[in-house]
Structure formats: structure tokens, C-alpha cells
Image: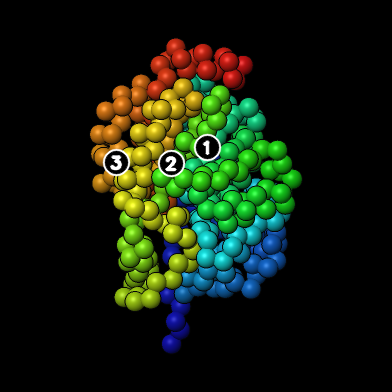
């Protein structure tokens, strides 16, 4: 008896992804293998008779990312240290496209492009993926900040090894893990936007429990040994107080840097943390707060963005910085 299951009817496009996202269609493994032949060893037919990889194999996931970054973003060399976060590219691309859309609301509906647009990535990680996508898609320049020296070194190596990133990505070590913008944003420095994918969990135990729950759901059976197929170090996966505490501190510090940045933003993974962020923002009274829903597959998340600049101040910012 065959172990194959009836072939699934997959939608032509992943409608929940942003219309400009290059990853709305299913992965074309033949094309990706032609770009990155080393991916071939991980591609096989799954139980639905579709080409795929084993998403529970960290090596397969990393090699897939290498192929995607090479094929779509001209990244010729991309390596990360073992055990560090290997993020799903489609979701990262979605953040960049949605935040570009937001920036257009301060620019008469047109997305500002080019290296004069400066973005601060809080928690750039060893993978440097947000700057890669932002540089390739919109030509923006980036500052990537992280509390982990290994992550900074890894991201710097990626920048140094890829000409497309030359002169467009500056990496900075945050020496005080309790700070977010302090120690990173210079006194007279200006950013058009900030982005962040905050640590999700409040402890290592919570992170491990979350990994077990996710794997059990994916495999439709109880899994007792966590496998971080996308990797992740302590500062990437958890922090004291988890996502809610991290975002609360970010919002608090943003008020101190209200004239240094046009739009602040962060991913909010847990729906329950959204109201907490709203409550904190209400205290600080920004001029505008936006919530942008995002989704990939069965997973839903959202971006929250805020600015302390009035419409008049936004118009002045546009004239002074974007021409």
C-alpha cells in the first residue's frame, strides 16, 4: 500500500502576504536548485507528492534560506553561526513591504526609496535579513543593532561578503542589554523608521515549551524533545518579561527620541500584548498610531507603528530629508 496521500490543492498565491512580496507563490525548488545546487540534497517528494524539504532539519532550512536570498536578493554568501536564528524569509519580507507602505503615507502616497532613507533594525541578529531585503527592494540604508557580539560579527561578515550591501549597512553593538535606542541613536542622528522583531518568550523554559507545542501541532503527534529548526539564541528568543516587557521599554524610550525618528514600529506576535502596547502609547500620546495586520499560512501577527510628528512636522521632514 502506498504511503502517498492525495495531492493537496494549493492556492496559486498566498493571499495573506503583501502583494509585492516575492514569496507569494509556492517555492519553485527546480529554480532554487538551479541557483543553489547544494539545496538539491535536501529536496524530495513529500507525502502529498509535492517537492519540498524537511522543515524539521535545521541544515535544510538554512540551505533553503541561502537559496532564497541568492535567487531573489543577490546575496552570494550567507552563513550564520550554528544555533543562531534562521528566520523564514517570506515573513521578514512582509514586514519590510508593509512598513514601506506606511512610510508612503508621509510622502503623498509614494514609497520613498534610495539610500537617504535610513532604517534602524533593533535586533538585527546574525542573519541580517531585514537589511538585506530593505536594501534590495527599496535601496534604503540600515543601522543594525544587537546586544550579541557574535551576531554583530556574523552580520558584518555577510555585509562584507556581498557587494549589494556595500556602504548601506552599519552594524552597532548595544552594550547595555536594558537599553534599546540609548547608546545606538546618535545625538544628531535621524532615522526615517525603526523596525523590530522582539524576543517572544519570557524565559528559556517558555521558549522550549513553545517549540514543543509548535512541533507537536505540525507533526500531529506529541513531541517531547524540542528541535529549534529555525534556531535562536537567548536574546533572539526570550528576555525578562518577554515580548510585552520589551515593547513597553521600546515605547518608553521612543518618547525620548521622538524628534530623532519619523516612524517607530515593532512586530507584536501575541494578540494579548497589543492592548498593553496601546495602553503604554496612550500615556505618551503620539500623534498617530497604526496597526497593520500580517499573516502567513495559519499564523497571524501584526505590526504596530507610531509617530510623534504632526502632519505639518511630517511634511517638513519629507522636504528636509526626501526632497
**Local SS, label 3:** helix
Crowd around label 3: few <14 · some 14–19 · many ≥20 (10 Å): some
Q: Nearer the viewer, mark 2 or mark 3?
A: 2
Q: Are marks 2 and 3 in contact (CB under 8 Å)?
A: no
Mark positioned earlier in the residue sequence (1 or 3): 1
Residue under the image location 39 percent in, 38 percent down: 250
Q: Hey, which residue is sitting farthest front in the picture?
A: 176
**Disc assigned to residue 179:** 2
Q: Which image quarter holds the N terminus?
A: bottom left
Circle 3 residue: 274
Q: Are marks 1 and 2 in contact (CB under 8 Å)?
A: yes
- Depicted 322 relative to depicted 205: above or below: above
Residue 49 visible: no
- Depicted 167 relative to depicted 312: above or below: below
The colouring scheme, among rainbow, by chain, secondary structure or one colour, is rainbow
Q: Hey, which residue is sitting farthest bottom in the picture?
A: 1
Q: Position of residue 258 (x, y in %)?
A: 43, 25
- Depicted 283 relative to depicted 15: above or below: above
Q: Are marks 1 and 3 in contact (CB under 8 Å)?
A: no
Residue under the image location 47 percent in, 60 percent down: 233
Crowd around label 1: few <14 · some 14–19 · many ≥20 (10 Å): many
Looking at the rendering, which quadrant does residue 190 occupy? top right
Q: Which image quarter holds the C terminus?
A: top right
Residue under the image location 43 percent in, 71 percent down: 227
From the viewer's perspective, tell me whether residue 106 is left or right of residue 44. Answer: left
Residue under the image location 40 percent in, 22 percent down: 308
Circle 1 residue: 184
**Disc assigned to residue 284:** none
Amino acid at each position: 500500500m502506498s504511503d502517498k496521500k492525495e495531492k493537496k490543492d494549493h492556492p496559486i498565491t498566498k493571499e495573506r502576504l503583501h502583494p509585492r512580496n516575492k514569496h507569494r507563490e509556492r517555492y519553485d525548488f527546480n529554480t532554487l536548485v538551479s541557483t543553489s545546487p547544494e539545496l538539491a540534497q535536501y529536496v524530495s517528494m513529500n507525502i502529498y507528492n509535492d517537492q519540498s524539504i524537511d522543515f524539521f532539519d535545521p541544515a535544510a532550512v538554512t540551505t533553503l534560506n541561502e537559496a532564497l536570498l541568492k535567487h531573489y536578493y543577490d546575496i552570494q554568501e550567507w552563513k550564520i553561526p550554528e544555533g543562531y536564528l534562521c528566520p523564514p524569509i517570506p515573513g521578514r519580507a512582509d514586514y519590510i513591504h508593509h512598513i514601506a507602505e506606511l512610510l508612503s503615507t508621509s510622502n503623498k502616497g509614494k514609497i520613498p526609496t534610495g539610500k537617504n532613507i535610513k532604517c534602524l533594525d533593533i535586533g538585527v541578529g546574525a542573519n541580517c535579513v531585514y537589511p538585506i531585503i530593505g536594501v534590495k527592494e527599496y535601496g534604503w540604508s540600515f543601522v543594525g543593532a544587537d546586544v550579541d557580539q557574535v551576531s554583530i560579527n556574523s552580520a558584518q561578515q555577510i555585509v562584507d561578503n556581498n557587494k549589494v550591501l556595500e556602504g548601506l549597512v552599519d552594524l552597532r553593538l548595544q552594550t547595555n542589554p536594558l537599553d534599546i535606542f540609548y547608546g545606538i541613536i546618535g545625538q544628531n542622528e535621524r532615522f526615517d523608521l525603526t523596525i523590530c522583531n522582539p524576543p517572544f518568550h519570557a524565559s528559556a523554559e517558555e521558549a522550549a515549551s513553545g517549540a514543543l507545542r509548535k512541533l507537536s501541532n505540525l507533526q500531529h503527534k506529541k513531541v517531547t524533545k524540542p528541535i529549534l529548526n529555525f534556531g535562536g539564541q537567548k536574546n533572539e528568543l526570550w528576555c525578562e518579561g518577554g515580548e510585552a516587557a520589551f515593547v513597553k521599554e521600546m515605547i518608553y524610550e521612543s518618547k525620548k527620541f521622538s524628534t530623532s525618528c519619523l516612524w517607530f514600529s515593532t512586530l507584536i506576535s501575541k494578540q494579548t500584548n497589543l492592548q498593553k502596547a496601546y495602553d503604554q502609547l496612550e500615556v505618551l500620546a503620539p500623534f498617530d498610531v497604526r496597526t497593520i495586520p500580517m499573516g502567513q499560512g495559519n499564523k497571524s501577527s501584526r505590526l504596530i507603528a507610531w509617530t510623534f510628528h504632526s502632519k505639518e512636522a511630517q511634511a517638513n521632514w519629507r522636504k528636509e530629508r526626501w526632497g
